[in-house]
Amino acid sequence: MAIAIILVLVVVASVLFHLLAPWQMTPAASNWGSIDTTLLITLVITGIFFIAITVFMAIAVIRFRHREGARAHYQPESKKLEGWLVILTSLGIIGMLAPGLVVYNDFVQVPQEATQLEVVAQQWQWAFRFPGQDGKLGKADVKWIDPGNPFGLDRNDPAGQDDVLVMNNEVRLPIDRPVKVLLRAKDVLHDFYVPQMRAKMDMVPGMVSHFWFTPTRLGKFEVLCAEYCGLGHYNMRGHLVVEEQGAFDQWFASQPTFAQTLTSVATPSRDSLLEKGRQLVESHGCRACHSQDGSASLGPGWKDLYGRAEQLADGTRVQVDEAYLKESILKPQARLVQGFAPVMVAYTFTQDDLAAVVAFIKSLSAAGQNEQGPAGAQDELAAQGQRLAESLGCLACHSVDGSQGIGPSWQGLYGKTETLADGSQIKVDEGYLKDSVRQPGAAIVKGYAAVMPTLTPNDKELDALIAFIKSKAAVDADAGKVESGKSP
């Protein structure tokens, strides 16, 4: 009797937990509410079978419990009972499979008006590609992948020259426009998963899988890898931002094309960098608020701005260096200069465009002009190293802001003394960094797993990577001096 009561209580508790639990699925942010309906149908069918079987067990325990003098009935088979079981279980299986097959068929039948988005997965980061003005994606193959061409696009294919590349973990889409998502993996099995979109599909090396959806809610949604892909699997995260068409168009126009990335692999001259910065300043209307001759305007004037100490709205002071200028462009409300209204909008420049704008602002100050020559060339080499680090996937494991990652952070790394796995210590200099790139298993830093693959950059590429890592250490030193009230 006690067993029967426990079985009934299990059924009641399970039903109440489902009905009263606060943990429910978030509302769908796309057109795939039918996926939620399919899950609900599966839950109802399995729930009915769970209740029926458990209640039957409770009844059987009571009705056929041991009693003095009672004898068990021997019934080797019952065709009627077997027939009902076959019919009911078949209906249950059909009820669970049929809706899923219908939804999956819709999931891969892409409407003609859908735009295309290619998602490229690599341990442990995401990258994205849009077709350019011709509306076509260029050819891609793993045989064409190299540090200057991380997507593996055909350099000779005219259709791929205007493809728009997004080489970071955040991508944006316009609201209420259907999107065909093409999925590629460069190394191992991955899975592209956006829970709120109800979008999920495996990414198999050597294959291109696809599905489609229409974003229906504005917001920022997390992108996850839902297939174990190595020790850094937990860190393979990104974001999908859904915004209005106008905001998306502005962001889309700021992303580089494949042809532009090919020309940017070579280190640009300082004159070309300044000219590019000047053109960007004019095209984005910066002159309307920031004067270049020292006259008063809506925002701080740029003449002799670089290298100057500014009073902020909160009473603190800041040294105007590259880090502050970049932050002020990307997040203009973060640290406002005293006496100016918070009217500047945030811009979404690429790293190359941002470097060009900052170089132009620096050229208007004596302090910035003094950095021309070897220092300017070093900055350009570091910028090339940053592009290589992004294309090689280095930044998926090594942060540049001091945050914990799969590998040691590059912020403040150069010149630091590290303890290795064998207990010895080593100073991080150019020699150690070069050895760590070409022979990553030779000297592993304590506390980190030996998961880094062996890279084979040429000497120029390796010099660029080292210059970028060194630049992160230099930025830290300058920031520390500013915080302590000393000029850099």
Image (cartoon, rainbow, N blue to C red):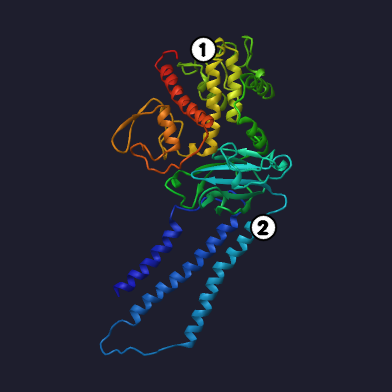
| Three-letter residue code for mark 1 | Arg
Is 210 located above or below residue 347 in the figure? below
Q: Can you give x and y, in whole percent of width and height, for residue 242 in the image? A: 60, 41
Label located before the other in sequence (2 or 1): 2
Which quadrant of the rendered structure holds the N terminus?
bottom left
Question: From this viewpoint, is residue 393 visible?
Answer: yes
Q: Can you give x and y, in whole percent of width and height, for residue 119 in the image? A: 59, 46
Q: Which secondary structure lies at badge 1?
A: loop
Which quadrant of the rendered structure holds the C terminus?
top left
Residue 228, numbered circle: none
| Three-letter residue code for mark 2 | Gln
Q: Residues within 10 Å of mark 2 (few under 14, many from 20)?
A: few
Q: Which residue is mark 2?
A: 109
Question: From this viewpoint, is residue 346 visible?
Answer: no
Is 54 located above or below residue 314 in the figure? below
Q: Which secondary structure lies at badge 2?
A: loop
- Does residue 115 appear to the left or right of 452 in the view shown? right
The residue at the point 63 percent across, 61 percent down is: 105
Q: 443 or 33: which is nearer to us?
A: 443
Q: 108 or 11: which is nearer to us?
A: 108
Residue 308, numbered circle: 1
Q: Residue 305, located in which quarter of the rendered image?
A: top right
